[in-house]
Image: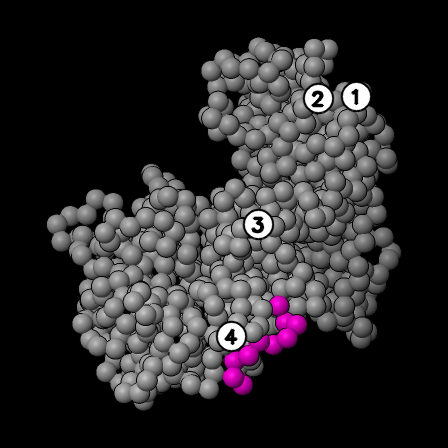
Amino acid sequence: MAFRLQTRPVRVSLIVAAAALVSGGVAVALPRSAAAAPVPDGSSALNAAPSCWAIKQTRPSSASGLYWLQTPLLVTAQQFYCDMTTDGGGWVLVGRGRENWSFHNAGQGTPGQVRNTPAGTGAFAPAALPGATIDGLLNGGSVQALGDGVRLRRATNAGGTAWQEMRWKVSGAAGWSWTFDGGMPLSSTTFGSSTYQGGTTADVDRDGLFAPYNRVWTTATSAKGWKRGFAYGERVSGGSNSSTNHLWTAGGEGSPMPFTQVWIRPKVTDPDYGTMPAAGLPARPNRALVSGATSPTPWGVTGVVAGGSGETNLEVQGIATLGDTVYVGGFFQYVQKGASPAAGEKVQQSYLAAFDARTGEWKSGFRPVLNGGVLDIQAAGDKIIVAGDFASVNGVANTKGLAALDPATGAPVAAWKATLERGSNAPRARALDVQGEWLYVGGTFTHIAGGATLAKSKLWVGGAARVRVTDGTPDTTWNPFFDGPVFDVDASDRGDRVYFGGRFENMGKQKETRANNFTVVDATGAGRRIPGVEDQSWRPTAIREDGQYRQTVKEVGDRVWLGGSEHDLQVYDRDFTRRIGSNITRAGGDFQDMVVKDGIVWGASHGWDYNYIGASTYPDVYAGGGFTAVHRSHGLGAWDAQTGEYLTAFNPSFRSRTGSGIWALEFDRFGCLWFGGDMNRGSWSGTGYQWLGGFGRLCALDHTPPPVPARLRVASTGDDGVGLAWDGVPNDTTVRYEVLRDGRVIATDLRGWNFKDALRDGASHRYVVRSHDTSGNRSASTPVLVVP
């Protein structure tokens, strides 16, 4: 029997054809006789169908139950529960439960719970498929395009013997979102045989005396103990918190939450797996996300000096890393070990402290003495530079608002001096960024001196300046001059421009240039505004001028990200000719800081509920063209830096003392994301929630593909099929293997280095093998092996 590697024909010798399979064993027992082409009836993984609907069309007598489904986007075959009777059948169950739905895109419970316990009292605890799995079932189709909408089947009595059929027709949605309580707009809702236009997934209220069940609302309320579900209105009674009642209430109040099943009916019948290129398939690593669960941080910072309050007087306002050290600045009063420190484990070290990036231990040798808060920190070679509203560091002159410190001790660097003034008021430096030979500074100050200019008259500036990284000398030829405070500054890596955001209206000493809270200035000239380069398509809806501001800005390649007032985060092309994406968070949610790593923008806010993707108006996110999706937001989110896609796989778990959220973000060299603000609780650790003192860290998930298998070959042929063998990774039990035939995965999670494909239909087929690990990373594949 001949075969081909890539496209070059090679004759297989009798020795190779008769060779035994490589040690490790065949992972799946296969019949000895030749097999015909598999029938996609869902009866097994090899016979997986593209949808429940497809099974029903080819086998109309199919009964409700478990079936194997597979699409190109679903990648591997998985089992699901199909309803083959209701309204022609072909429905797939994606979630079920009574009260306490999380409505998280990560899903809830396990897929096994969804499919194996679709109904009954054992199904009362909600279980829901991950949004990514449901998108795989849709195979690239949109939720809006589902002709039958989203089907809700709700119990209408305590015993679960009577049911209501509902249909939601979602408007504008592309991919799946479980965040029904966020209020996705609906084109229509059908209760039984009655259809109504409009409404949202948060609440459709059409009940009445003769239609008491015609309401569904999904939001959390105190009356329900903040539990979510698919509740009826006040006209429905009979609920209780009994473990057997299909209608749940917290304590006998009205509006019970019924046991509900959620179904969809994607009509995928003939998916295209494409043609694998001769060289094989590329690697499919996970996105370079950090875990949503906090890693232990034994030490933290606590207390606020002088009992200050408000968003600008939080424990942590700035974070930077240098080598193995994390520097934390803010308005904290103490460094503290754990929630219940022993003697000597709560030490007064106000405003600025250092911690070991590996262990989280406090570095007690770093002991600067400041008399005011730290708002930003910047690593700069062999020193760290701090900005704030302090008058001095260690009592050293010419360190007002800005100072360079020894990274080991915190003592001011003798060869570096810069100082700020603001008339009779205290100056405040709030933002720093280093680019090339310059340190850019933004804040609220009117004069600056430093380095070689200390003995001269101070330079008159307007909240912005740049000084030499080497000694703090200001650039007297570069002076953008703003008429209000600067909140953030980002100097382009290209060295040609600098972005400023804040609460200012004009530039220039005579206010000759309009700035509108954000502007882009040249870095190579005198610091003048670059005409036409600004966020021209964003118009804040706040009437009050002081309600409009830009708080964080970041250039990433040919994209510019902006966040600030009205809870918005938007991304533009570098020349601001088009807006690529927009987000509005609520309730709460002004964006406060950003950091970029591995093509992902991490944005911090005090938004704890929802992110409305595509929205550009606040507070009415339905105006201005509305939005395309709503997902959960919990103080920190991740976005694709180029496309603006919101990465829903990231789901953080932590809490903030006052709800002010995260004001500082920084990655360390080990891939952990440090975040700071007024954080006081981390993730659940098995026995309790982790304690956080002002800051925490989220460490990187595995996103490295395993090694690529080699030498895919035919090891045997015969009436029982073709035996494939390859060279895998020796002595590594974490690596598994997948076999793809004609672009479709036909075997996965193989431990051995061989596989027998029983298909013998007389046709030519293309095979590749790739490895995968327990984290879901997939390697590149072998080159294509063509077996005629």
Residue at left 55%, top 15%?
254
Instruction: Report the residue marked by disc 2.
Output: 206
- Residue sitting at 34 percent across and 53 percent down? 314
Q: Which residue is mark 4?
A: 510
* Residue interval drawn in magenta: 524-534
Viewer-side label of 4, 1: 4
User: Circle 2: is it few (<14), some (14-19), or many (20+) Cα within 10 Å?
Assistant: some
- Mark before the other along the chain sequence, 2 or 3: 2
Residue 394 or 10: which is nearer the viewer? 394
Which mark, by number, is residue 542?
3
Secondary structure beneath dot 4 equals: loop
| Residue 524 percent across, percent down from the top left | 54, 85
Which callout, 4 or 1, points at the residue further toward the start of the chain?
1
- Alpha carbon separation for disc pair 4 and 3: 27 Å
Kind of element beneath mark 3: loop
Tag 1 near tag 2, CB within 8 Å: yes
Q: Disc 1 residue type?
A: Ser
Tag 1 residue: 194
Q: The residue under label 3 is which amino acid type? A: Ala
- Residue 680 x, y percent position in the rendering: 34, 46
Residue depth check, mark 1 versus mark 2: number of the one nearer the observer: 2
